[in-house]
Amino acid sequence: MNKKVLLTGISGYIGNHCAVELLKNGYSVRGSVRSLSKSEKVIDAIKKEVDPKDNLEFCELDLLNDDGWDDAMKGCEFVMHVASPFINIEPKDENEYIRPAVDGTMRALNAAKKAGIKRVVLTSSMVSMLENADKSIKVDSKSWTNVKAKNVSTYAKSKTLAERAAWDFINAQTDATPMELTVVNPGPVFGPTLSGDLSGASMGMFKQMMSGKMPMVPQAAINMSDVRDIAKIHVLALENEKAAGKRFIVTTEEPFAFQELAKILKSNGYDNVSTRLAPNFLLNLIGNFDREARSMRSFIGKTYNGDISLTKKTFDWSPMPFKKTVLDTAKSIESYP
């Protein structure tokens, strides 16, 4: 019998890749979707990489609703909580993001605890680690975003509060065999899409760059992530003894500027791409009335540098070359006109 993993958010960009990686590694997957009508699309996406055979099933879960969570855990040994709201635009009401992120995480953990799940792997983000300092900021597994700082995006707030709530829950356990938690913290995520859905934040941005609809790129640099690396570490984190109780940055070794990403595309025949830098004052100004620009404010003019040494050592892993990530993403976007 294959070990069964409950994978929340299987229909998403990262969720698709996590399902593929689980199936390739001999796990069976119960994927949660908001509506079972999405399951055919998920199967089609996964089949591009692996034949799920009888090792894939679906359940309906909502981050804001208690229904079905206890049943979803039945027969599972592990939980991968990948589902989270992500949109690039600052909402009018920040609770639109914060509630599903925090409440959904707590629903997953409470139900997992009740069901006797051994370990939960949670998808967080580097945005929960961005110490609000000056121009160049080094972050590692001990870094946390100050949610009260100026210009912190609602997305960063939602991810930070959800991850904090998860650790608080884990640390408050008093039983002899407490449930374990491992957290994966990616940067901006690129790499091929399996579903062709380009509505996510990073894919949407990438498509705009390729089509020339982004006349200038922001002056900002951060470690970037390949979706295939993220899926790989999620799966390795399920049973690696050293991974319990830790946060893992899964990104490139060095930070990359958005301009470097644009230059890789430009020098590989994507002629519509602009490599011009947007002046910082302009982005700040636009941020006053454009919700998409506002979500970038905390990054502008800064270089964030994440330390991946713990991830490399724990999993004997090294990240995909960034150029490969960029070109594979472009190819993938081109294949979905």
Image (spheres, grey):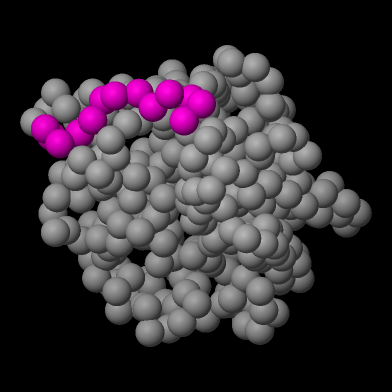
Q: Could you tell me which residue is drawn at 30 percent across and 61 percent down? A: 197
Compared across the picture, whether 321 is left or right of 176 comes to left
Q: Residue 262 at what x, y percent from top left?
A: 26, 29
- Residue 270 picture quarter: top left
Q: Say if the magenta span includes residue 275.
A: yes
Compared across the picture, whether 106 is left or right of 289 comes to right
Q: Could you tell me which residue is drawn at 29 percent across and 24 percent down? A: 276
Q: Residue 144 at what x, y percent from top left?
A: 71, 33
Decide if residue 227 is in sight here.
Answer: no
What span is colored magenta in the figure?
A: 270-282
Decide if residue 7 is in sight here.
Answer: yes
Q: Residue 58 at what x, y percent from top left?
A: 44, 78
Q: Residue 302 at what x, y percent from top left?
A: 54, 21
- Residue 146 picture quarter: top right
Say if 33 sits above or below 302 in the image. Answer: below
Say if 72 sits above or below 263 in the image. Answer: below
- The foreground one among 143 and 298 is 298
Q: Could you tell me which residue is drawn at 52 percent across and 81 percent down? A: 60
